[in-house]
Amino acid sequence: MVILGIDPGLLYCGYGIIKKDGSKVMLLDYGYLKLSSSKNIAQRLSTIHIFFDQLIQKYQVTDVSLETPFLGKNAQNFLKLGYVRGILYLLVHHHQAIIHEFSPREIKRALTGWGGAPKDQVAHVILNLFPRMEKPEREDVTDALAVTLCGLWNNSRTIPSLR
Amino acid sequence: MVILGIDPGLLYCGYGIIKKDGSKVMLLDYGYLKLSSSKNIAQRLSTIHIFFDQLIQKYQVTDVSLETPFLGKNAQNFLKLGYVRGILYLLVHHHQAIIHEFSPREIKRALTGWGGAPKDQVAHVILNLFPRMEKPEREDVTDALAVTLCGLWNNSRTIPSLR
């Protein structure tokens, strides 16, 4: 089982990839894709499509984990998130992966024990779980790793050791 | 210039295709794609991707025309519309087409002269413009033809005769 967790966006897409092999859990990759704001939406969606298509193939991803979107103050951002998610759904179907979705509260509760935890508290737990990981430059990365772990725990239903 | 106008959705996607060759304007195709509600979103998005990919290739579409989405009462429908639009943007980029977008008011005003016109008034004008066309089964088709015509008029800036 190889889980790709994504924190999608049209400017930054954070991602984390975790492999589970029996009781062994490995952090394979993490980082973010930066999109150029000088490109139009269609160009950026194409970049996202190509990037995650290659990532899924490279790591033979079996599961994709995403946060369920909620409508914030900005309806246009919500719609743009929809564009990116549409692309990700297309890839999930193309690669016959399994999709997992979690609400922001579920993710925070799974990581910190409290659904209302602030983002830096989630990041703190992530860094504790992966002691050899350097603190990522962007919060998108820890957010993506949080949703990746939710996908992992959703399946294993026990908290495996993380090395 | 071959314009594909789409009224997108996860249950029905209406479409119209109009070709402009000098002063000659031809209605090449129109209809709708019905998606099965028993399929999941990823499967339906994949069906939409394949369908419009083939349609764009078949008619050598150069321009794609869409209505700008607005947030109605249902935020989930707005998000789902985002998924479909993400797929369409990807196709537009892949086939190097030009995208045109019009607000609902612009479309109604272009067709009927009044931005607040009801949908059946728009449908009435469409049927007058294409006298040999049978009344479509679904409003999605006349809605798609309305946005197709906006794409046509946006470029030609004169109202060509429609035969």
Image: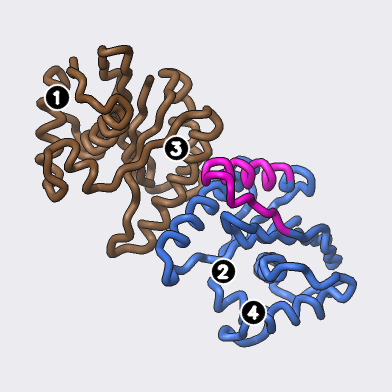
Chain colours: A blue, B brown
| Label 2 Cα neighbours within 10 Å, binned few <14 / some 14-19 / many ≥20 | some
Look at label 2 and name its amino acid.
Phe
Return the residue at label 1.
B129
| Label 1 Cα neighbours within 10 Å, binned few <14 / some 14-19 / many ≥20 | some
Look at label 4 and name its amino acid.
Lys
Residue shown at 26% from the left, 16% from the top: B25
Residue in the foreground of this view, choosing between A158 and B25: B25
Q: Quadrant of the C terminus of chain B?
A: top left
| Label 3 Cα neighbours within 10 Å, binned few <14 / some 14-19 / many ≥20 | many
Look at label 3 and name its amino acid.
Ile
Asked if A56 appears above or below B26 in the picture, the reply is below
Residue shown at 32% from the left, 24% from the top: B17
Closest to the camera, between mark 4 and mark 2, is: 4
Return the residue at label 3.
B48
Q: Distance between the Cα atoms at labels 3 and 4?
A: 36 Å
- Residue B145: tell me if it is visible: yes
Q: Distance between the Cα atoms at labels 1 and 3?
A: 28 Å
Q: How many marks?
A: 4
User: Which chain does tag 4 point to?
Assistant: A
- Say if labels 2 and 3 share a chain: no
Task: In the rendered structure, find residue A102 and report the number of the disc placed on it.
Answer: 2
Return the residue at label 4.
A119
The magenta segment: A32-54
Residue A35 belongs to the span the image colors magenta: yes
